[in-house]
């Protein structure tokens, strides 16, 4: 965090501190959003086949570190190691699934009628904000971030403050795989600080969120002023 603020993440097993985590705020979100905006033109212009190769490299690295990811996830969420081991591998599968669709991300559709041709084209919307939940955070982060990257969007990720540790592993893996600087930015922090700043930031063009229905409603209100598109999975039933 720019101001040096931190918060402690606690083990849900015994409520003892696991780690001290940077507590980002509006200034950190602004820096991350500007980095994502600066990186967007080159990433969006990169051929889909090149993005595909990079995302597969990330998947390879996730598989190589799956045991470590599962162990950290187990400590951070209190869920069974057996389940988290499967979730870590599912994260790699998510990256592979969307990597294979990167080359067709710009494919549109042509509808021919007498004397006219109607065409649709797809373009990446720009920098997007991703806010992920406390339960199964690693896998759900990959489920939101991988398609954004495959489509040519850049990302600012704010993980849940209750289980933020594997988000650091994930962005570290992406950096080591060769993802260009600024394409994927991580800001830890609280929802009322970093989360609010992310959903209101004018450089962020869309928000992907998994969490409570009440929070989803707040995000829609906060993003209304900048006409943000939203993609929600809310309350387990997605109301």
Image (cartoon, rainbow, N blue to C red):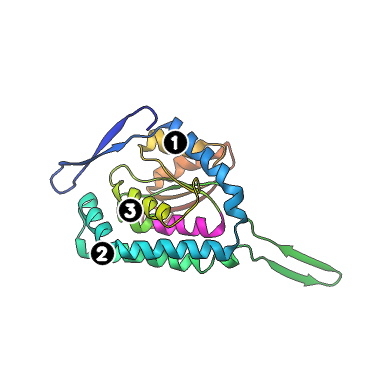
Q: Position of residue 13 (x, y in %)?
A: 15, 49
- Magenta segment boundaries in residue numbering: 142-152
Q: Position of residue 196 (x, y in %)?
A: 44, 36
In the rendered view of the protein, which quadrant contains the C terminus? Answer: bottom left
**Farthest-out residue, right:** 115
Of the two numbered discs 2 and 1 on the same chain, state the one appearing first in sequence: 2
Q: Residue at x 42, y 59 (%)?
A: 143
State the SS at label 1. Answer: helix
Disc number placed over residue 196 in the picture, else none: 1
Q: Main secondary structure of the magenta part?
A: helix
In the rendered view of the protein, which quadrant contains the N terminus? Answer: top left
Residue 83 highlighted magenta (yes or no): no
Q: Position of residue 195 (x, y in %)?
A: 42, 38
Q: Residue at x 29, y 33 (%)?
A: 6
Of the two numbered discs 2 and 3 on the same chain, state the one appearing first in sequence: 2
Q: Residue at x 25, y 62 (%)?
A: 67
Q: Position of residue 43 (x, y in %)?
A: 57, 53
Q: How packed is label 1: few (under 14 Cα within 10 Å), some, or many (20 or more)?
A: some
- Residue at image mark 3: 137
Q: Are marks 2 and 1 in contact (CB under 8 Å)?
A: no
Q: How packed is label 2: few (under 14 Cα within 10 Å), some, or many (20 or more)?
A: some
Q: Residue at x 42, y 54 (%)?
A: 174
Residue 145 highlighted magenta (yes or no): yes
């Amino acid at each position: 965090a720019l101001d040096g603020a931190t918060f402690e993440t606690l083990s849900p097993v015994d409520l003892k501190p696991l780690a001290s985590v940077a507590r980002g705020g509006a200034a950190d979100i602004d820096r991350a959003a500007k980095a994502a905006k600066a990186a967007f033109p080159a990433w969006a212009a990169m051929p889909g086949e090149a993005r595909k190769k990079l995302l597969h490299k990330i998947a390879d690295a996730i598989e190589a570190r799956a045991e470590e990811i599962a162990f950290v996830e187990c400590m951070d969420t209190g869920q069974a190691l057996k389940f988290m081991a499967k979730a870590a591998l599912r994260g790699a599968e998510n990256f592979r699934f969307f990597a294979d669709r990167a080359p067709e991300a710009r494919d549109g559709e042509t509808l021919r009628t007498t004397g006219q041709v109607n065409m649709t084209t797809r373009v990446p919307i720009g920098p997007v904000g991703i806010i992920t939940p406390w339960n199964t955070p690693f896998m759900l982060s990959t489920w939101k971030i991988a398609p954004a990257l495959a489509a040519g969007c850049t990302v600012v990720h704010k993980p849940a403050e209750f289980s933020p540790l594997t988000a650091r592993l994930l962005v570290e893996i992406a950096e080591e795989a060769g993802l260009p600087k600024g394409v994927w930015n991580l800001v830890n922090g609280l929802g009322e600080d970093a989360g609010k700043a992310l959903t209101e930031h004018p450089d962020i063009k869309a928000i992907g969120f998994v969490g409570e229905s009440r929070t989803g409603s707040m995000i829609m209100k906060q993003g209304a002023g900048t006409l943000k598109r939203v993609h929600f999975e809310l309350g387990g039933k997605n109301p």
